[in-house]
Amino acid sequence: MSPPDTSSPTCALCNGTVPEYRLTGGDDAVFCCTGCQNVQRVLGGEQADGGEQDTTHGAMSDSGADEIQREGDVSESLTESRVFLQIEGMHCATCEAFLESIAEDCTGVTDVAASYVTETIRVEYDPRAISVDELCDALSPLGYTATRRDGGRDGPTTAVGRSRQQDETGGRDIDEVLGFRYAAGVIFGTFMLLPYAVLLYPAQLSSFFGDGTLDMYASASGIGGGDGLLILPLFLVLTGVVLVFTGLPLLQGAYVSLKMRQPNTDLLVALTVVSAYVYSTVAFLLGRIDVFYDLTIVVAASVVAAIFYESLSKQRAMERLTDLTISRVTTARRYDMDGATTTVDVSDLEPGDQILVREGERIPVDGTLAEGECTVDEAVVTGESLPVQKRAGDDLVGGAVVTNGAAVLVVSDGASSSIDRLITSVWNLQSGDHGVQRQADRLASVVIPVVVIGGILAGGWSLVMGAGVPLAVLTTLSVLLVGCPWALGLATPLSVATSIEEAVTRGIVVFDETVFERLRNVDVVAFDKTGTITTGQMDVLEADAPADLLRLVAEVEQRASHPAANAIATAFARQQDGKTARTDGGVEEASGERAERVTGFTSHVTGVEGVVADTRVLVGNLDLFVEQEWVVSDEIETRATEARDVGQLPVIVGRDGRAEGVIVVGDNLREGWDDTVTQLSDRGIDIVILTGDDKSATTFLDGHPAVDHVFAGVPPAGKTATIRQLQSRGQVAMVGDGTNDAPALATADLGISLGSGTALASDAADISIVDDDLSAVETTFDLAYAARRRLKQNNQLALLYNGITIPLAVAGLLNPVFAMAAVVGSGGLIAVNSFRDLIDE
């Protein structure tokens, strides 16, 4: 018989550490909790490739999400060989491929993954061969700017944090430069187009009609010769300045697309404006007046303006988010040899150090409770809505809050925090989340080769027919000029910008232009329960106790720091000025009664007690009353058990040795949750509920006709693994609000965070709903479908330019004035259509 396996087993679903009591699931699979076991039982057999589940590494092994569960060596290895860089200017899938190719060519780089969705690139490298500064320099070509995402000093920053940091450090310089280029293009363009229209348009029309009507005007203007030699060179030079300066982002994008052999709309626009400029220059040298300098100016300026407007829209969307703080601690109170505490940086902590965490403070790193008892709120990490009791020897999670008592913590190996590992997990997932190539880019990859080949064939045919080289060049350029649907480069950013703006006005912040496209393909929506389906805040739901006792209980609870205590004090406290608090936040006269002073206050792990008006008051759970040997009736005990069974928190209250009632505290359901899940279900979308709470907290969801699955007791890593399991059914959207939801939000095909959530959740999500309005999830789907209609309409309008110019060119009737009219008509209709209300269409 082979010896027993003494290695630490890992959860078959989430790679979490399995406790001594193993939860088996068949085939030697073990699980860390009943939540993971249930998820695997229900979903484990449904793999996208039809194969069997890999129970050795879990569903997350290929994503980096298992970083959550690794030990302290993760932090060390990440510091030595992995860096996350923020790349300003990365705006499409072509940029991803280009920057990845640059990084791969750097000495010492072993792996790289870029995502324009989050403007992040993850680089695995050998620090002995290349430094982070050298990586930043290498990844800052052609207008891109690479900086450390963690700031190189202050640690990870969130989406909001990055925005503020960029404001302070010049990170918005790119937007400012883009705006300056646009302004310069408008100024120079306006300066040039006025005399251009006055001088050139009459001459070009006169040449077209050939009836001599405008010959006198053309001669007087000096276009046809003589002084015209001074006017056209001026247009040539100034148009060149506008093309190179204002149009540089287009030329940069075109260069990158050629280098990567991935044609995009930047190349479409660049071909049009460059062809128009070169054609005009050749025509000028041949003494002709059919020049298209105006087209170069207007197209370059309008497209760059649309790109600039899109950038501003995204920036304004980011600024709509509230400045939420992330649950991360940078310092700790460490006990010295003499027993005194010294404040040190978390990075200076070593395994075995003892640190003090006071009541109300956040635990900086993972460890174990050295002595005594305390109560902690782990919701930010685990999603569990109710505080958890801890005793000596129990594990404490970095990021949790000590709500009752103080904690002396022994630092675990690696001195890492679950919050830090959550952040790293999110960044790993984000940097590997490649963006979706735009529909217009896909169209460009088909159109550009056809147009270029057509131009070359047309020029070659001209040579065969006896035309000279100059005329053959003009023929080739004219085909490029009229055949490239440049307006697609205007339609896409303008559609994106106005869709983002309209979403923001409805309290829906969209960070990425591909969000709407992905949202339309969603098959499953997974909701976190605590803070999403529910409000995530403790409130008094029911109180069955004498009114005078409730007032005494409120006086005692004002001394406690437990979330339930705050809810009870808010509902029943009588203030010292003779006014009593109402549940709506106001006050009313207290009929002459005044608050009593609390004496002999004592805080227990499971409740509090004190003396008010010579009356001994005890508030807490059933165990506390049993421990204190107070009398509890069967009726009160039954009511407390019933409340606990449905996921609520029963608080027994009593005085002078006897329990007299129960206050039920719980997490209220969010308004409109039922309608939201029902409407989504009516769209044919499967609804799944995930929660870190135990099964009793999800009773109200059992049997709901719109809910397909409810998974309770699922840890953060388990939520991420569940999302991956659900992805075997199709595209998955995740709706959550907390830091513990962030990896799942980032793993999902689409993440949606509520405004009450943490900044890390917002950072991980593709969509943030600012106003805690769950019904906005359904509105977001409406916007997605409306945005598709708008983009389709704009793409059709973009082809109007070609629909006008191509027939004219084929008939030999193409004239610069007519071409300019087509530019204005097509661009104007796109702008008008873009600024219409989306949902009201």
Image: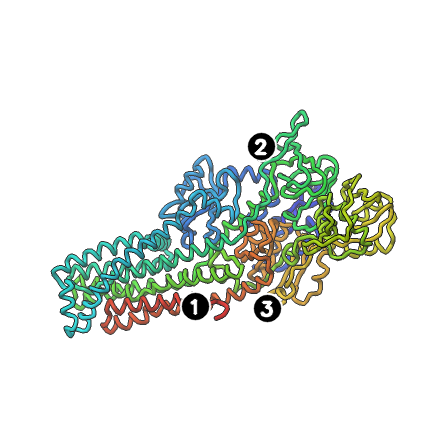
Q: Which residue is mark 2?
A: 348
Towards the viewer: 773 or 48: 773
Secondary structure of the residue carrying tag 1 is helix
Q: Residue furthest left?
A: 226
The numbered mark, 1 or 2, whose residue comes first in the sequence reads 2
* Outermost residue, front side: 592
Residue 192, picture quadrant: bottom left
Which is in the foreground here, disc 1 or disc 3? 1
The residue where tag 1 is placed is 792
Residue marked by disc 3? 684
Q: Earlier in the sequence, mark 2 or mark 3?
A: 2
- Residue 136 occupies which quadrant of the picture? top left
Looking at the picture, which amino acid does disc 2 mark?
Asp
Q: Which secondary structure, mark 2? A: helix
- Place of residue 28 in the rendered image (x, y in percent of width and height, measured from the top left): 69, 50
Q: How is the image coloured?
A: rainbow
Residue drawn at x 78%, y 56% as measured from the top left: 543
